[in-house]
Image (cartoon, helix red, strand yellow):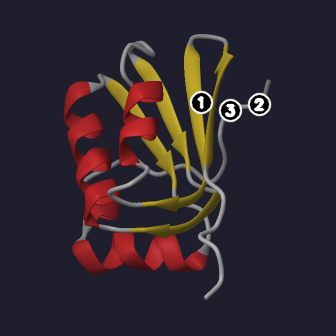
């Protein structure tokens, strides 16, 4: 059996916006790490999912909760597999989507 893929999450500020960028799988085991980086990040947050390889219902629930709690929240949906999950559950219509995070 192959080992589980590595997971990491980074946070950086670009002007008034905080970009939270997880890498690997967002699931029940890793969602709290992403949540910790978003909590207290401020009113302008972009969740950059370009390096995410998988997202389950725990990750989708986090995105929905953040879209309600953070005044200016957007998602860079990332790879086709992740975009497909957003499309299947209709989350792409409820959460602002960006093609890329802000530069900086």
- Which residue bears the numbered disc 2? 103
The residue under the point 66% across, 11% down is 15
Quadrant housing the C terminus: top right
Cα–Cα span, label 2 and label 1: 10 Å
Cα–Cα span, label 3 and label 2: 4 Å
Locate residue 49 relative to residue 63 in the image: left or right: right
- Between marks 2 and 1 in the image, the one whose residue lies nearer the viewer: 1
- Which residue bears the numbered disc 1? 19
- Between marks 3 and 1 in the image, the one whose residue lies nearer the viewer: 1
Element marked by disc 3:
loop
**Front in this rendered view, residue 89 or 62:** 62
Instruction: Relative to 63, say whether 1 is above or below.
Output: below
Displayed quadrant of residue 27: bottom left
- Which residue bears the numbered disc 3? 102
Element marked by disc 2:
loop
Question: Is the C-beta separation of discs 3 and 1 under 8 Å?
Answer: yes
The residue under the point 44% across, 79% down is 84
**Front in this rendered view, residue 14 or 2:** 2
Query: Residue 38: horizontal and vertical position, in percent?
Result: 42, 27
Element marked by disc 1:
strand
Residue 88 is marked as none
Locate residue 104 relative to residue 34 in the image: left or right: right
Query: Residue 70: horizontal and vertical position, in percent?
Result: 30, 25
Q: Earlier in the sequence, mark 3 or mark 1?
A: 1
Instruction: Relative to 84, say whether 22 is above or below.
Output: above
Quadrant housing the N terminus: bottom right
Please rate how many residues cluster around mark 1, counting C-alpha atoms within 10 Å: few if below 14, some from 14 to 19, many from 20: many
The residue under the point 59% across, 30% down is 19
The residue under the point 32% across, 47% down is 63
């Amino acid at each position: 059996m192959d080992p589980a893929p590595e997971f990491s999450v980074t946070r950086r500020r670009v002007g008034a916006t905080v970009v939270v960028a997880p890498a690997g799988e967002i699931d029940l085991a890793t969602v709290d790490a992403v949540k910790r980086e978003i909590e207290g990040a401020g009113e302008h947050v972009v969740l950059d999912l370009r390096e995410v390889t998988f997202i389950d219902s725990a990750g989708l629930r986090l995105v929905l909760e953040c879209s309600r709690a953070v005044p200016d929240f957007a998602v860079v949906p990332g790879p086709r597999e992740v975009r497909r999950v957003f499309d299947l559950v209709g989350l792409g219509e409820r959460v602002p989507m960006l093609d890329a995070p802000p530069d900086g």
